[in-house]
Image (tube, rainbow, N blue to C red):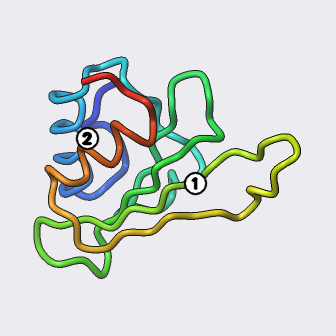
Amino acid sequence: MNIWAVNKTEDIKKLLIMLTSQLGKEAFDISERWQTDLSAVGLCKRGDPSLVAYIYTHGQEPDKYGVHLLFPELPDVNTRGIIDAKENVTFEQLLDIVAIHLDIVV
């Protein structure tokens, strides 16, 4: 994927490059769900599009990110609509959050 060709703000493109550099080119997929939101991106676990980290810059302090962690529906457990949200996190914090949520070995 050519990150510079993605229709996102420079902040999001820079973030994708940094995440790819730290986690690897094959660490996650980009969700098409938020492709029209220029200042946000959804990262999915490879092979599991229901496990998502939605990352955005709007409303955040400079060089900080907001992230919503979305969980898949599980049998016998009502997980529909469960979201864990964090605001104004640093890149280092975001890196840990994404790696843990998407089960990426660093």
* Image position of 5 (left or right of 54): left
Q: Is residue 60 above or below residue 43?
A: below
Residue under label 2, please give it: 16
In the displayed orientation, state which residue is furthest to the front: 76
* Image position of 74 (left or right of 91): right
Between circles 1 and 2, the one closer to the viewer is 1
Instruction: Tell me the amino acid under the disc marked 1.
Output: Leu
Q: Where is residue 99, by image quadrant? A: top left
Q: Is residue 1 above or below residue 73?
A: above
Residue under label 1, please give it: 70
Instruction: Tell me the amino acid under the disc marked 2.
Output: Leu
In the displayed orientation, state which residue is furthest to the bottom: 59
Q: Where is residue 60, by image quadrant? A: bottom left
The N terminus, quarter of image: top left
Q: Residue at x 16, y 53 (%)?
A: 91
Q: Secondary structure at mark 2?
A: helix
Q: Residue at x 22, y 65 (%)?
A: 89
